[in-house]
Image (cartoon, rainbow, N blue to C red):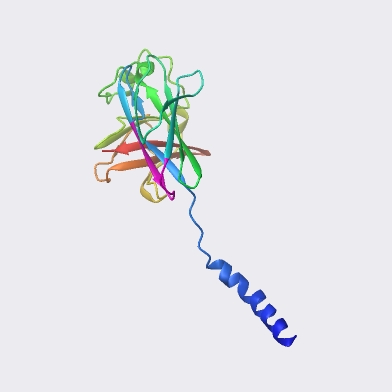
């Protein structure tokens, strides 16, 4: 009886320590890499990246041009033509060998809706938005996306009326660039990303109590 009580007490005391060292498998995740803007009729290429899953993978790509999602592909990459006069939403659901599922979404802005086409977007904000009534005041636009050197950001007017902060975050969650801006009130901002490694990143823009995040690709 004494040994039984002693063993029970040891298990009770040490159980929490053993629990702290138990391995926890990170969540299965999937990410879409692809353009954030395009012109009518552009052929778009999207890539998938999976993390913490078990092969083999089953892919389901879906597109939405304003009428609801419909299936458009079942491989690890997707080729899709930019619709005419419409924005594009893409979703990807991946099922791994253990039956786990993960989903990611991406949005492609149609540059014709902003007064385009815009293969090389101008530095002058006025000429970029001249004649368009479709640019919403709470939008943030990135271009070009993908980019190899300069990332241009058009901010909503309410962001530039006060101080704002840029952060570039990699897919591991690490902040690799940060800049606070309190003086430059221009809607069109530029960040030099030529020193970044190739891959997908997240731009985080914060102003007052508003935070927006947008993915972009570094070539």
Q: Residue at x 49, y 50 (%)?
A: 27
Q: Which quadrant: the C terminus? A: top left
Q: Which quadrant: the N terminus? A: bottom right
Give the farthest residue toward the top.
131
**Where, by quadrant of the figure, is residue 18 drawn?**
bottom right
**Where, by quadrant of the figure, is residue 185 drawn?**
top left
Q: Nearer the viewer, residue 90 or 121?
A: 90
Q: Is residue 87 above or below residue 46?
A: above
Q: Is residue 178 left or right of residue 104?
A: left
Q: Nearer the viewer, residue 86 or 103?
A: 103
The span shown in magenta is 46-57
Give the mark count.
Answer: 0
Q: Residue at x 40, y 50 (%)?
A: 172
User: Per the image, is 172 magenta?
Assistant: no
Q: Is residue 194 left or right of residue 136?
A: left
Q: Residue at x 65, y 79 (%)?
A: 10
Q: Position of residue 79 (x, y in %)?
A: 33, 27
Q: Is residue 133 above or below residue 63?
A: above
Q: Nearer the viewer, residue 102 or 115?
A: 102
Q: Position of residue 52 (x, y in %)?
A: 43, 50
Q: Position of residue 92 (x, y in %)?
A: 44, 34
Give the farthest residue toward the bottom.
2
Q: Is residue 16 above or below residue 165?
A: below
Q: Residue at x 28, y 24 (%)?
A: 121
> Is any atom of residue 161 visible in this view?
no
> Is any atom of residue 13 visible in this view?
yes
């Amino acid at each position: 009886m004494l040994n039984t009580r002693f063993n029970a007490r040891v298990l009770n005391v040490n159980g929490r320590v053993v629990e702290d060292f138990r391995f926890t498998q990170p969540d299965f995740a999937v990410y879409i890499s692809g353009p954030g803007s395009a012109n009518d009729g552009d052929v778009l290429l999207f890539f998938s990246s999976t993390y913490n899953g078990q092969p083999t993978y089953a892919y389901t790509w879906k597109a939405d041009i304003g009428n609801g999602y419909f299936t458009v592909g079942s491989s690890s990459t997707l080729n899709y033509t930019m619709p005419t006069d419409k924005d594009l939403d893409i979703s990807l659901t991946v099922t791994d060998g253990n039956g786990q599922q993960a989903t990611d979404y991406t949005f492609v802005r149609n540059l014709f809706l902003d007064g385009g086409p815009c293969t090389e977007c101008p530095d002058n904000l006025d000429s970029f938005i001249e004649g368009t009534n479709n640019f919403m005041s709470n939008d943030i636009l990135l271009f070009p996306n993908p980019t190899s050197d300069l990332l241009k950001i058009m901010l909503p007017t309410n962001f530039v009326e006060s101080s704002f902060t840029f952060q570039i975050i990699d897919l591991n969650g690490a902040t690799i660039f940060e800049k606070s801006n309190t003086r430059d009130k221009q809607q069109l901002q530029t960040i030099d990303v030529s020193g970044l490694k190739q891959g997908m990143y997240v731009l985080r823009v914060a102003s007052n109590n508003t935070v927006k995040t947008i993915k972009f690709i570094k070539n």
